[in-house]
Amino acid sequence: MAAHPELTHPITANTAQACPSCQAQAQGNYCAHCGEATVIHPPSAGEFIHEFVGHFVALEGKLWETLRLLMFRPGQLTADFLRGRRVPTINPLRLYLSLSLVVFALIKLYGVDLPQVFITENAIGATYSHTGFVPDAPKKVGTITYDVTLKQTGGDDGQGDAYTVPWALKLFGAVNEGWAGNVRHFMHAPPAEQAELLNHGFLANLPYMLIGALPLFALYLKLIHWRSGRRYGEHLVFALHVSSFAFLLASLMILLPGNVGWLVACLYTGRFVALSAWDFLQVVPLLWLLAYLPAAMRRVYGGTPRAAWAKSLIVASVHLAVILGLVVCAELIAIVKHA
């Protein structure tokens, strides 16, 4: 079958033809008015792959320079971007989106161990399950579960706390009876069903949580550096680069053996026998991030090392609290609104 003439006839230097986009008379391979390509041909699968990899995921030649500065020169990407040096490195938003896609793909591929909220008539808490070596049988691999009671209530007899789970159910019922019914269903569901519901709620809302937390991160920076006179957009660039670095470390933590959440659960309960050296290795990326933020803030905002550490501690604490709050909200939404 012959190719369609509109898809095979190029515009040469000696001919003029209306541009497909702006209808201006164009000569050569590109329209001088809008830049549209004038050599028209059927798109190939290879071109689509190149477009996706080269532009959306940002795997270009300058990726390696961007990653080098991001990892080993805290704050340098932001400082360069704000003073106009932008061509040699990847755009901050594109870098953020690309690394976030990597994290989401790794979570989907490898999964993550999440603490599971439990609600009973008399207690609210969390259960953390982890597959690893059983303490009483070091060579046996099994699933270990630790319960952490966050709030012990007194039921409906008036002898305990005023704000009990039944009281909360009544409050939910006053707003929406279906919500209260969903909470009751969750309370009596098997642990496996509860875990599936909470994991689905967390992973489904994770992108929205991170996107919502990003402008808040920039707002904290704006408030803590309000005397600097910098615009909000400048703080947003810094937030994009730091968040990109955090995504990079999160990817590394997912690929490494061990689990930092399990480490925290064991330290909280005092059960150290279930830990491995790999669990402690997970602390290294966290310490790297802890040292990274003040170094980046000092390079971008200036000031003394002590001031940079103090400000970074405040910003990191507030941001972590917000992230944890968003995680809890995501799981509560999954509980009260599930079908």
Image: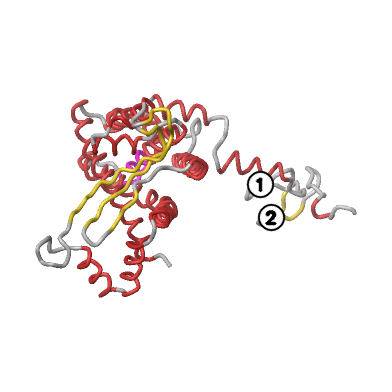
Q: Position of residue 175 (x, y in %)?
A: 28, 73
- Distance of mark 2 from mark 1, alpha carbons? 9 Å
Which quadrant, please, contains the C terminus? Answer: bottom left
Tell me, yes or no, if residue 291 can be seen here: yes
User: In terms of depth relative to the viewer, which is nearer, 133 or 229?
Assistant: 133
The secondary structure making up most of the magenta span is helix
Observer able to see residue 75: no
Q: Answer whether residue 106 is magenta in the image.
A: no
Label 1 packing within 10 angstroms: few (<14), some (14-19), many (20+): some
The mark that comes first in sequence, 2 or 1, is: 2
Res. 32 mark: 1
Which residue is the site of mark 2? 24
Horizontally, residue 37 falls left or right of residue 217, namely right
* SS of the residue under disc 1: loop
Pick out the residue farthest to the left: 159
Amino acid residing under circle 1 = Ala
Please give the range of residues in magenta: 231-239
- Based on the displayed image, in which of its 4 quarters is residue 77 positioned? top left
Q: Is residue 237 magenta?
A: yes
- Residue 142 relative to residue 58: left or right: left
Tell me if label 2 and label 1 are in contact, CB under 8 Å. Answer: yes
- Asked if residue 324 lies left or right of residue 53, the reply is left
The image quadrant of residue 296 is top left
Identity of the residue drawn at 34% across and 43% down: 145
